[in-house]
Image (cartoon, rainbow, N blue to C red):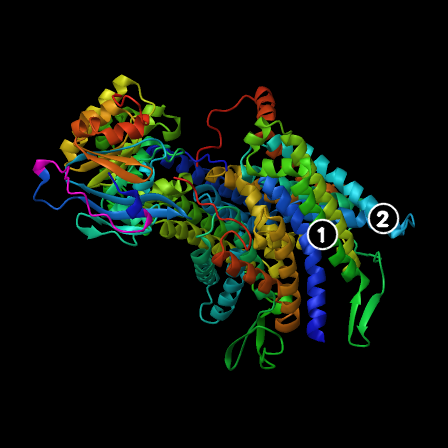
Amino acid sequence: MADKKQFEKGKMVPVPSVSIIPERDLGTTPILECSHLGIDFGGLTAVNEFNITVGRTEIAGLIGPNGAGKTTVFNLLTKVYQPTRGTILLDGLDTHGKTPAQINRMGIARTFQNIRLFNNLSVEDNVKIGLHNQEKYSMFTGILRLPKYWRQEKAAHERALELLSIFNMEDLADHQAGSLPYGAQRRLEIVRALATNPSLLLLDEPAAGMNPSETAELMENIVKIRDTFQIAIMLIEHDMSLVMGICEGICVLNFGQIIAKGTAEEIQSNPTVIEAYLGKQQEGGAD
Amino acid sequence: MEKRLNGKRLSKASRSGFINYGIVIAAFALIQILLVVQKLLGVTLVSNSLQSLLVPTCCYIVMAVSLNLTVGILGELSLGHAGFMSLGAFSGIVASFLLADVIPFAPLRLALSMIVGAAFGAVGGVIVGVPVLRLQGDYLAIVTLAFGQIIKNIIMVLYVGVDEKGFHIAASSERFNLAEDGTAIIKGPMGAVGVTKLASFTAGFVLILITLVVVQNLVNSRSGRAIMALRDNRIAAESVGINTTKYKLMAFVTSAALAGAAGALFGLNYSSTVASKFDFNASILVLVFVVLGGLGSIRGSIIAAALLYVLPELLRQFGDIADYRMLVYAIVLILVMLATNNDQLKALVGRIIPKRKGAASHG
Amino acid sequence: MSFLNNVITGISLGSIYAIIALGYTMVYGIAKMLNFAHGDVIMVGAYVCFFAMGSFNLPPVVGVLLAVVVCTVLGMVIERLAYKPLRAAPSLAVLITAIGVSYLLQNSAQILWGAATKTFRPIVEGSLTLVPGQLSVSYVAILSVVCCVVVMVGLTLFTGQTKMGKAMRACSEDKGAAQLMGIDVNATISMTFAIGSALAALAGVLMCSAYPVLSPTTGSMPGIRAFTAAVFGGIGSVPGALLGGILLGVIETFGKAYISTDLSDAVVFAVLIIVLLVRPAGLMGKYVPEKV
């Protein structure tokens, strides 16, 4: 457990030695290494001493009660907020001073808790916008419709349909993104993120609003995505069946601080975690 | 903000684009035929006053389509579009004057002047865009308004002329040391005088076609998608690696360049032009075309600009009504906005006029 | 001495801008719309006072009161007929409607009262001499500053202390929540328009007393400048409108005196742009980043 007094004095806490990197990823550069990451809003410390290491093909979970700062961590990783302190290494490269767009080009893609699609555009165009940096032709090539334009547009069209097929959404390609049902919108966000060719995919509550069977399907698909694309996935989720089912390493956040890290079994039996979720109980033996 | 542009498949978008070319070409052909018939038969089909409106109407169509790129497709409100038109008009006039001896062939000179106008418009777009596009919403709007005013104000004190010693430019009449036998092109508050009228309806037609090619092809390309992504959700667009500044600037500068070209054509259609012609009200006029035509709808912009520019001008002829024309215009404007944006009124109008499927919402 | 003279002119002009800017800022704060017709309400106010004093020989005080009453009603009517049906509409639709209302007012004025410029008789004449032959302050200038101070103090007390004022603040924060607390949002917005238009009438009379030309387009340029002042100070902020108005008046006067009469507009707007680049939400506005 983190020592609160030390934080108040602004001292650094050493990176916890417990590694949750899966065995197959050992010996390679971790895709993500955060050390002493933190951000203050005004006088309020929203996240502090966030230290985490994610392996190259790991599925990692970030859980915690509401308001624990999980989404803030994602916003720090993608530089929507600039961290007040600490470093983020992506594939061994420092991301200091990068913009959200540059971070994406470096290899992090994300989805949003409150879905952010390009609502007025078609499903296919949403995915094609994800392919933006893989297409290379210039504005003038586009306006003059040079052969390069036709070639790359055709390739983008095919790639977009291929990516949509992960979730069997090819038939929806012509639909307006904003008019899709909620679950399909969440899936489209994942497809769009994948289109940017990331090495780390951040999913912010991917199963929110889904029914159990949809969630089960999503779980399968997340694992499938990891296996096909050989990428790391980090997800925020309240659905414990999903987190405990597919996450190899889990990190629990409370009041902006990591209170536990480990495998699903370790987390489930951790008394600090139980206390954070259920509050202190007299008998102590809560589920 | 109302967003109606829908990104249909390439084929559908292209089809909609081809219809737009068709409309423009058909309108041009029709008017040309009427003019020929009129000449042959000696009857009045297209009145003189209507003929004099042809070139400015083309200019305003280009203005509306280009402003739609900023407001409808990029999603940023601009209240200073006429400023770029002004830059284009005066730079185009100066260019055509300087080129008069070098290039005697008028259409080529007009084309080059319009390119110069577009270049000045683009430079203006960069100067305004680089600092301003960091701002958002109404703040961006007020700064574009401010730039429009500044451009107007500066041109109103600008003196440009040529004499044996060469090119002269000054910010006041005292500092304007033009030789006696020199020619003043722009004379401060009096504006540009003694302009050789080079503009023609055909040039306007070609400019509209070029504008359509640029805007429609841009929209249906990688860059255009990036621009629309910024409009729909800036944060999501950044999250997929889109460079906000680059694409905002691309849309804004393209829009300004087209306005500059339209300005050059407009300026070269009259023997004299004053900067106050391109004031805030002119910017608003174009914005009204864009909004009434439908945000993001290129066809809507073309039709709204043509109708709304010609109608009030035609009403000028009718003595008594002439006084009331702007009043009528204002009332119509308010009623149309109410009828299209209030749910109850929309339902009422819908009952009277059955809605055509997808009308006016396709670019 | 000319420097002091310019300061005085600037502050009195700025006071008038501030009074107009208050109308913009209050309406923006509560209805989140740029009321482009606000400048034309100024013009209507000035015309009402002009005819009251000129044609009916009423005393200036009655003329001003009449202008205030007419504009208050006008403001509420405009809001009811043109803006209220568009409460749920996109902001651009409301903006265009406001532009339509602006055209409507200008053209109605032209038809009713003619396009010719009228010479406005100031409501107070003469001036106070401070240094004989060198420094004097016109009573209109003094009156403008006094009115501005009174309006500011009054508005601050009103929004801070009264029930209606608190309702206005609540509505500007969150209309939905205000409604749930039992506040009549429509009445509050109507009230805001009423106050804004009353202030516009007052500003119109003061403006035409200081610069005695009156035409149907009299209101548009001061309207744009005051709008600029509101943005300058931070739109939605009442002290911001005061600060923005005064600064704008002073900058305009100094620009005219020391840079160029012809370029005063360019100077004013250039300063605005610089301010916005440094402080994107104006001098006293709060920048609220979008929540992710």
Please provide the residue range marked out in magenta: A8-24
Amino acid type, label 2: Gly
User: Considering only vertical position in the picture, is C181 above or below B124?
Assistant: above
Q: Left or right: B107 with respect to A40?
A: right
Q: Residue at x 68, y 35 (%)?
A: C163
**Residue B153 in the image: x percent, y percent?**
60, 63
Q: Quadrant of residue B329?
A: top right
- At label 2, counting other C-alpha atoms closer than 10 Å, the crowd grade (few under 14, some 14-19, many 20 or more) is many
Question: Which residue in the protein does label 1 denote?
Answer: C217
Q: Nearer the viewer, residue A83 or C110?
A: A83
Question: Circles 2 and 1: CB distance less than 8 Å?
Answer: no
Mark 2 and mark 1 lie on one chain; the one further toward the N terminus is 2
Mark 2, chain letter?
A: C
- At label 1, counting other C-alpha atoms closer than 10 Å, the crowd grade (few under 14, some 14-19, many 20 or more) is many
**Residue C141 in the image: x percent, y percent?**
76, 61
Magenta: predominant secondary structure element? loop
Amino acid type, label 1: Thr
Q: Left or right: C168 with respect to B70?
A: right
Q: Left or right: A146 with respect to A32?
A: right
Image quadrant occupied by the N terminus of chain C: bottom right
Helix, strand, or loop for circle 1?
Answer: loop
Q: Nearer the viewer, residue B362 or B310?
A: B362
Q: Quadrant of residue B108?
A: bottom left
Residue C213 drawn in magenta:
no
**Residue A276 in the image: x percent, y percent?**
30, 30
**Residue A45 in the image: x percent, y percent?**
36, 45
Question: Which residue in the protein does label 2 denote?
Answer: C63
Q: Residue at x 55, y 33 (%)?
A: C89
Q: Which of the labelled discs sits on residue B229, or is there none? A: none
Mark 1, chain letter?
A: C
